[in-house]
Image (cartoon, rainbow, N blue to C red):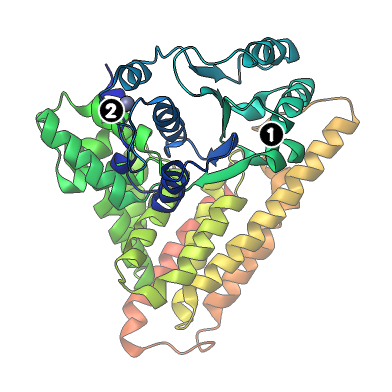
């Protein structure tokens, strides 16, 4: 049995987080005032299926109390083992046709075999076909009194409004890092897995709020004598946190030379700039949670998140990042809002590149091709369209105008080093291979 199944909650009170939703559900059950159709919506691994299972366990339980199933009666034991004759779990993805739903509806009219209710859990319900939804709708309008429907979905917006309006909707938020992390540590204690707190936090940070992902990563790593930050970084191909941290610190301190050294070090380990940006965002988010340098970082974080969202995976992120560094170099001249300024420039650059890609795709489609990334574009064309020259001019101009912005006296050595760096980066930029 997988660790995830082994530690799946047997009672509502064992569910980690989702307090609001779970409390509401328990209240309804306790007062015997629950509805006959529910939608459990939320991203994967947040407890929708677990809650649906517990709900069905409760309504079929022989002696539930205080909003919890008894967990010991024959009905509870069968529900737990997935063999209860009144609980139907249907995968909406593979049973999505109207015929599947019609068969299901034909069965619904028969009374439950052993309990008060028959429960139909339809997972991934958004995968049903249009006609399947229509067939389901009729039943949802007037379900037999002994039936409860629980529809689970990761994509609520794909469920027709007509269906949604017939159901009570419960939403499941992404589980917080600290909750996942604490749960992983708890499981590790039971399983004699040597998991460090740092390791747990790092796993939790890489799950997108999914407990299932967290537990499955833990399980994959459980053969290690010790699971610490290093183990997790290695297994998940993450960038060393210390590297990310110093890179950001150097950028914030305008120490571009060291920032570039760290950047090169990271690239040497076979990581991509996209991974670095992800790592920076995670690092900054963590820093903000800890109230560390909040004012300085929050706008940077916002910009970085925006930056990442805007960058299409196919575009030449390496080039963008070089521009980012070049801009960061030039920003040593501007004491206030330097990084923000840089990121604004990068934003502008992304916009230019995106428009360019769109234009290329449009032209190629018009001539009957169906272009797919990477769109190999030679340097000359890219230079022409990406406006690279003006960027270089801009940087050169900034370098030339020494008295443009206030510079502290002791910055002169750094400035000289930065100028050299910028020049060498510009050289690289001249030769870039555009694969936008
Ligand atoms: Zn029971």
The tag on residue 375 is 1
Residue density around tag 1, few if under 14, some if 14–19, many if 20 or more, within 10 Å? some
Establish if 419 lies above or below 376: below
Establish if 392 lies above or below 309: below
The tag earlier along the polypeptide, 1 or 2, is 2
Q: 93 or 134: nearer the eye? A: 134
* Label 2: which secondary element: loop
Instruction: Name which residue lies at 27% across and 51% down.
Output: 241
The tag on residue 326 is none
The image shows residue 135 at horizontal and vertical percentages of: 76, 21
The image shows residue 159 at horizontal and vertical percentages of: 69, 35
Instruction: Name which residue lies at 90% across and 29% down.
Output: 367
User: Mark 1 or mark 2: which is in front?
Assistant: 2
Instruction: Name which residue lies at 58% across and 51% down.
Output: 309
The image shows residue 225 at horizontal and vertical percentages of: 9, 29
Q: Is residue 370 left or right of residue 148?
A: right
Residue density around tag 2, few if under 14, some if 14–19, many if 20 or more, within 10 Å? many
- For disc 2, the marked residue is 71
Q: Is mark 2 within 8 Å of ligand 1?
A: yes
The image shows residue 97 at horizontal and vertical percentages of: 71, 14
Ligand 1 shown in quarter: top left
Quadrant of the rendered image containing residue 388:
bottom right
């Amino acid at each position: 049995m997988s660790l995830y199944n082994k530690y799946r909650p047997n009672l509502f009170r064992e569910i980690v987080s989702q307090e609001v939703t779970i409390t509401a559900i328990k209240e309804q059950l306790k007062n015997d005032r629950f509805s006959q159709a529910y939608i459990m919506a939320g991203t994967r691994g947040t407890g929708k299926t677990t809650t649906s299972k517990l709900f069905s366990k409760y309504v079929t339980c022989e002696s539930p109390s205080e909003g919890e199933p008894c967990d010991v009666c024959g009905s509870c034991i069968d529900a737990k083992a997935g063999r209860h004759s009144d609980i139907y779990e249907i995968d909406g993805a593979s049973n999505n046709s109207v015929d599947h739903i019609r068969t299901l509806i034909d069965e619904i009219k028969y009374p439950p075999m052993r309990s008060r209710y028959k429960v139909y859990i339809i997972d991934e319900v958004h995968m049903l076909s249009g006609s399947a939804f229509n067939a389901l709708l009729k039943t949802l309008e007037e379900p037999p009194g002994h039936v409860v429907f629980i529809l689970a979905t990761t994509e609520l917006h794909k469920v027709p409004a007509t269906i949604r309006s017939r159901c009570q909707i419960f939403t499941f938020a992404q589980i917080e890092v600290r909750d996942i992390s604490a749960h992983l540590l708890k499981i590790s204690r039971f399983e004699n897995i040597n998991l460090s707190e740092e390791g747990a936090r790092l796993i939790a940070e890489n799950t997108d709020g999914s407990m299932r992902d967290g537990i499955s990563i833990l399980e994959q790593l459980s053969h290690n004598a010790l699971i610490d930050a290093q183990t997790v970084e290695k297994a998940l191909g993450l960038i060393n946190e210390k590297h990310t941290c110093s890179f950001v610190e150097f950028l914030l301190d305008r120490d571009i030379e060291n920032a570039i050294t760290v950047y090169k070090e990271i690239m040497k380990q076979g990581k991509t700039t996209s991974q670095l940006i992800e790592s920076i965002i995670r690092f900054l988010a963590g820093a903000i949670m800890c109230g560390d340098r909040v004012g300085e970082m929050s706008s940077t974080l916002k910009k970085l998140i925006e930056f990442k969202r805007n960058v299409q995976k196919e575009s030449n992120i390496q080039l963008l990042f070089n521009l980012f560094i070049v801009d960061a170099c030039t920003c040593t001249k501007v004491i206030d809002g330097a990084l923000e300024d840089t990121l604004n420039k990068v934003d502008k650059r992304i916009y230019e590149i995106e428009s360019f890609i769109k234009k290329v795709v449009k032209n190629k489609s018009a001539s009957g091709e169906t272009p797919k990334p990477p769109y190999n574009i030679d340097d000359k064309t890219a230079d022409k369209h990406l406006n690279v020259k003006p960027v270089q001019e801009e940087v050169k101009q900034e370098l030339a105008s020494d008295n443009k912005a206030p510079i502290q006296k002791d910055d002169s050595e750094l400035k000289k080093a930065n100028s050299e760096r910028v020049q060498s980066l510009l050289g690289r930029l001249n030769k870039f291979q555009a694969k936008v």
